Image (cartoon, rainbow, N blue to C red):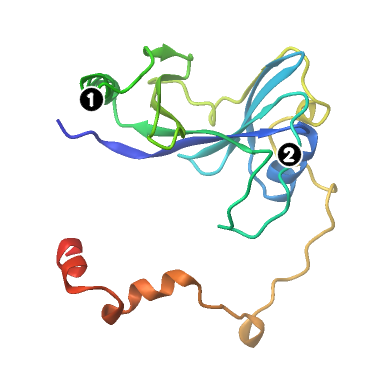
C-alpha cells in the first residue's frame, strides 16, 4: 500500500533560552506561538510556519548554542536538532508505516496519542530520530493555541501573536537594480548538459 505523505508536520529543535527563541521566531520572523508544553526544567513550544507546518523547540537546562558556521559545512559538538516529524494523510497510513518498519526488522515505537497527533518513532540508518504523525481530526493548535506550561517563560505569557516594538522597525526593502540574486550550487540542476543521460531518463 502506498503511504500518502503530506509534508513535514514539525521540526523539533533544542534551545537553552526559550525567550530568545520566542523573540526571534515569533517577534522577528512573525511565526505565531501556537502551543507550549512544560514544567520546571522542561519546555516544548510550537511555532506556526504555515497553515500546515510548524517548528518546535525543546528548552532543557545546559543546552548551548551551536558554534556559528556556514550552511552545509560539517560540524562537531553541541547540537540544535532533536527530531523531524513527517505528517501522514490518515490514521491508516500510520499503522501501515508501523507494520512496514516492523516487517523490515527496524525498531519502531508503539502508536502514541499526544492529544493533537498520533505518532510513531523510529531511526534512519544514520541514527536520525524520525517521527511520523497523523493529526487528530478536529484538533488544530493553529486554530486554538494552548499554553499548558505550568511555568511559562516571560515572553510566552504575552500570547501567541507577534509583539511589536521588540525589534527595530524595518526599512523599506530594496527594489529594482538593488535587488541582486546570486547563483547557488542548485542552479546546475537546470543545466540539461550537467545531468547524465541515465539520470535524466530516470527522472522523466
Direction from residue 2 to residue 75 in the image, left or right: right
Task: Using the image as rendered, state which of residue 108 and residue 162 is in the foreground.
Answer: 108
Q: Which mark is residue 21?
A: 2
Q: Nearer the viewer, residue 41 or 65?
A: 65
Residue 198 position within the rendered picture, expressed as x and y whole percent measured from the top left: 16, 68
* Residue beneath the point at 74% across and 71% down: 172
Q: Residues within 10 Å of mark 1 (few under 14, many from 20)?
A: few
116 lies above or below 73: above
Farthest residue, direction bottom: 177
Quadrant that contains the C terminus = bottom left
Q: Quadrant of residue 181?
A: bottom right
In which quarter of the view is residue 133 placed?
top left
| Residue 134: image location, x then y, percent | 37, 25
Mark drawn on residue 104: 1
Quarter of the image for the N terminus: give it: top left
Q: Could you say whether the residue bearing mark 1 is in a helix, strand or loop?
A: loop
On the image, the x and y values in percent for residue 196 come to 22, 73
Separation (CA) of disc 2 from disc 1: 39 Å
Q: Measured along the vertical axis of the image, is residue 11 above or below residue 30? A: above
- Using the image, tell me which numbered label, if any, was put on residue 1: none
Amino acid at each position: 500500500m502506498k503511504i500518502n505523505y503530506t509534508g513535514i508536520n514539525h521540526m523539533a529543535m533544542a534551545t537553552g533560552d526559550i525567550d530568545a527563541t520566542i523573540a526571534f521566531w515569533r517577534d522577528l520572523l512573525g511565526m505565531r506561538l501556537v502551543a507550549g508544553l512544560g514544567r520546571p526544567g522542561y519546555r516544548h513550544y510550537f511555532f506556526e510556519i504555515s497553515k500546515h507546518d510548524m517548528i518546535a523547540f525543546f528548552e532543557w537546562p545546559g543546552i548551548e548554542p551551536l558554534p556559528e558556521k556556514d550552511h552545509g559545512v560539517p560540524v562537531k559538538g553541541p547540537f540544535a536538532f532533536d527530531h523531524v516529524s513527517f505528517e501522514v494523510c490518515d490514521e491508516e497510513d500510520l499503522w501501515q508505516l508501523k507494520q512496514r518498519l516492523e516487517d523490515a526488522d527496524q525498531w519502531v515505537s508503539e502508536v502514541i496519542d499526544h492529544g493533537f497527533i498520533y505518532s510513531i518513532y523510529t531511526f534512519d540508518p544514520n541514527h536520525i530520530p524520525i517521527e511520523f504523525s497523523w493529526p487528530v481530526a478536529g484538533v488544530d493548535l493553529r486554530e486554538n493555541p494552548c499554553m499548558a506550561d505550568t511555568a511559562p517563560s516571560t515572553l510566552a505569557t504575552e500570547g501567541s501573536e507577534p509583539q511589536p516594538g521588540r525589534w527595530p522597525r524595518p526599512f523599506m526593502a530594496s527594489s529594482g537594480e538593488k535587488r541582486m540574486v546570486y547563483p547557488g550550487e542548485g542552479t546546475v540542476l537546470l543545466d540539461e548538459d550537467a545531468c547524465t543521460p541515465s539520470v535524466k531518463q530516470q527522472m522523466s
